[in-house]
Amino acid sequence: MTATSERVQQHRQRLRRAGLRPIQLWVPDTRQPGFADECRRQSATLAEDPQERDTLNWLQSVADDDGWR
């Protein structure tokens, strides 16, 4: 085992002892052609939706954004 893989293994063991576990997440690849266009299309679909407006207003009211502005 290389020094790097030993460090990684030890790090993972520390995380597990701390009560954490690894997971794998697959997310859209933002580098793919057309990704930004699809984001714009989906946003435009929701632009005038009253339920979306209510959801966004609620999110803004409960968000803890101290220090983010």
Image: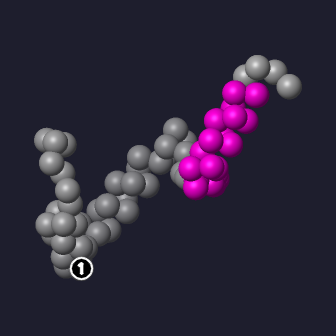
Q: Which residues are magenta?
A: 5-26
- Say which residue label 1 marks: 51
* Residue 11 relative to residue 48: left or right: right
Q: Which type of secondary structure does the marked residue at label 1 adopt?
A: helix
Write down the quadrant of residue 45 in the picture. Answer: bottom left
Write down the quadrant of residue 58 in the picture. Answer: bottom left
Q: What residue is shown at x 16% (from left), y 42% (from top)?
A: 67
| Image position of 39 with respect to 46: above or below | above
* Amino acid type of the residue tagged 1 in the rendering: Gln
* Residue 6 relative to residue 69: left or right: right
**Residue 68 lies within the magenta run:** no
* Residue 52 relative to residue 38: left or right: left
Q: Is residue 37 visible?
A: yes
Q: Position of residue 15 (x, y in %)?
A: 60, 45
| Image position of 50 with respect to 42: above or below | below
Q: Is residue 33 visible?
A: no
Q: Nearer the viewer, residue 25 or 31?
A: 25
**Residue 24 lies within the magenta run:** yes
Q: Position of residue 20 (x, y in %)?
A: 58, 53
* Residue 59 relative to residue 31: left or right: left
Q: Nearer the viewer, residue 42 or 12?
A: 12
For the C terminus, give its image quadrant.
top left
For the N terminus, give its image quadrant.
top right
